[in-house]
Amino acid sequence: MSDATDAILARLTALHPKVIDLSLDRLTALLADLGNPQDAIPPVIHIAGTNGKGSTQAYLRAGLEAAGLRVHAYTSPHLAYFNERIRLAGDLIGDAALAAVLAEVEAVNAGRPITFFEITTAAAFLAFARTPADVTLLEVGLGGRLDATNVVGAPRLTVITPVSIDHTQYLGETLAEIAGEKAGILKRGVPCVVARQQDEALAVIEARAARLGCPLAVAGQHWTAAREGDALVYQDERGLLDLPLPALPGPFQIDNAGTAIAALRELGYGQAEAAAAMTRVEWPARMQRLTRGPLVEAAQAGGCELWLDGGHNPAGGAAVAATLAAMPPRPTHLICGMLNTKDVAGYMAPLAAVAESLTAVAIPGEANTLPAETTAAAARAAGLPAGTAADAGAAVGALAAAHPGARLLICGSLYLAGRVLRENG
């Protein structure tokens, strides 16, 4: 990413330094001044949910591109570089194009208060409207009803991945309240694919869909996806698909993949596109095995594997635990950094059964990082022996020396994962 882009992003961050205030008013005013580019982008598949949004989008993109479509994609947060958020017709936006579109929205906004996510979403809409493509995959940033992406009036399809407790300061304290915010992306008459949900969340989604006349394709009711041996078997009213297992590791990826296949089926695609979605998918920091960089070299000095995962809420902790439990047996030691806005105890709870120890670190450059000792204390409270290290490099070096041949997993935050990938991706 260029210095010019960095400078613009820093200025955009400063436009709205106070706490997030979910509203569409600021963005709709800016978009109107820009000529409402959100109304000129290719047909939208709008994806909301608590966990699995990014993976589900990645499977969809792989399947649609295998069908020969040019695919725009919008995701957040980025890991290593901001460009990752905006993919134009299959390619990440270039530095020059990103700097130009950010400068344009900054000039038109003219210093008015607006959140960083809102103004950068406006920039993405401008880029999408000006670049020919066949479909736009739009991932919600936070919630749904008042999220900046929810200015698209008539998507082709909506998707709701599993809903769980997260961001309670913005979305509500109960699962029903949070599901109501996620279901805010439903639009009258537009079909919606719904991943496996807890009953409380599903009831809210179904009620809103009934009010709006949205045809639903619900996991467990209208379609199923399950692992059978070395295959993923997907079934719906159109028939049965015998597919390769997803390339992304972890038992929970069966559900994410099934949700994407259901969306592909709703769009009219079949066996070939679904199979390509399974085998061609790429999505970093989701139980990713690292293979190069100084941290990997430090791990390999002790014969250790080094893995990376960005999950950061209780469902993310459960997914990490399930993945580790399904992997070949090997002593596993965690290196964990978290934000103070997350349910740390809930994240830690499932991990004590699958890990030998946890080394806590602060996340460099993040104002909301949890102090390492606080993270370590939460791990110990969950029954996981824990200490601290100055940073991930120190943790990897110490663990590789003390536990040769172990599996080391850096986890707890997408921000920490991004830092690691910038130096070891």
Image (cartoon, rainbow, N blue to C red):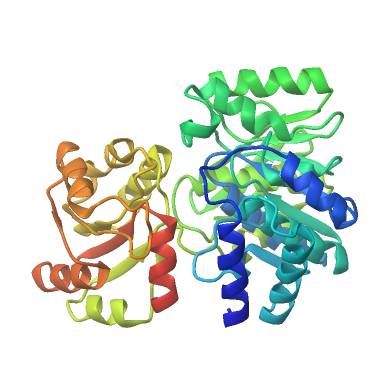
The residue that appears at 62% across and 61% down in the rendered structure is 12
Which quadrant of the rendered structure holds the C terminus? bottom left
Looking at this view, name the residue that lies furthest to the left.
402
Residue 43 appears in the figure: no
Q: Is residue 145 left or right of residue 131?
A: left
Residue 275 is left or right of residue 418, and the answer is right
| Residue at far front of view | 111
Residue 331 in sight in this render: yes
Q: Which residue is drawn at the image coordinates 63% and 30% (left, top)? A: 181
Which residue occupies the foreground of this view, 300 or 146?
A: 146
Q: Is residue 309 left or right of residue 27?
A: left
Nearer-the-camera pick, 76 or 262: 76
Q: Is residue 368 above or below residue 307?
A: above
398 over 193 or under it: above or below? below
Residue 287: quarter of image: bottom left
Using the image, determine if residue 247 lies above or below residue 23. below
Residue 402 at x, y percent in the picture:
9, 68
Q: Position of residue 406 (x, y in %)?
A: 20, 65
Residue 265, position in %: x, y? 77, 45
Q: How many marks?
A: 0
Going 25% across and 64% down the picture, which residue do you hit?
407
Q: Position of residue 158 (x, y in %)?
A: 75, 40
- The residue located at (59%, 65%) in the rendering is 11
**102 to 334, vertically: above or below:** below
Q: Which part of the image, by quadrant, shows the N terminus? A: bottom right
